[in-house]
Image: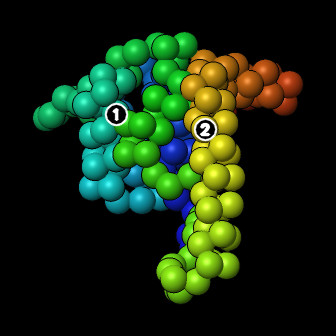
Amino acid sequence: MRNDSRLSRMLHVLIHMDRHEHSVTSEMIAKMLNTNPVVVRRTMAGLREQGYVRSEKGHGGGWTLVRPLSEITLLDVYNAIGEPHLFAIGPADDQPKCLVEQAVNAALEDAMKEAQALLLRRLGDVTLEKIAADFEAKFSALSATPYSCAS
């Protein structure tokens, strides 16, 4: 199963948007993420609906961050992009009448519910501001040259 990287990608985009003086077009974001602008617009729509970004059409338009990074958590972004599956593992349903399969599935479901609750709590504790501060610290330690993901 392929990893769902939407959460990571949108966190990346939002932090870049915070450091950008003007609005950012879907085409610019798509180029940064090596994807299609339609995919960007579809994913950003959830962030717009939740009030984290806004979009302007036409010349000079694009996406703008409307909330400070300190007010946006990883959980907020996770929810805004549609709550993708957190784990690739899950119960089997090959033999639903098999008592062994039922016992295995019950144990897995309990463990997965606990793990998911813990992960969601952790996502709610981390703001984008904290991630951006980590980037700034690492960047400062490297040099004073301009940074770009495209380099």
Rendering coords of residue 21 (x, y %): 42, 19
Residue in the foreground of this view, choosing between 5 and 82: 82
Residue drawn at x 66%, y 36% is: 118
Q: Is residue 148 visible?
A: no
Residue in the foreground of this view, choosing between 91 and 124: 91
Rendering coords of residue 48 (x, y %): 28, 31
Rendering coords of residue 40 (x, y %): 34, 49
Q: Secondary structure at mark 2?
A: helix
Q: Residues within 10 Å of mark 2 (few under 14, many from 20)?
A: few
Circles 1 and 2 in contact, beta carbons < 8 Å? no
Q: Residue furthest left?
A: 58
Residue drawn at x 19%, y 29% is: 56
For the N terminus, give its image quadrant: bottom right
Q: Amino acid at mark 2?
A: Ala
Q: Is residue 139 visible?
A: yes
Residue in the foreground of this view, choosing between 6 and 143: 6
Residue drawn at x 63%, y 22% is: 125
Image quadrant in which you'd find residue 117: top right
The answer to whether residue 70 is left or right of residue 107 is left
Q: Which residue is mark 2?
A: 117
Q: Is residue 17 above or below residue 27?
A: above
How many angstroms separate mark 1 from mark 2 (CA)? Answer: 22 Å
Rendering coords of residue 124 (x, y %): 57, 26
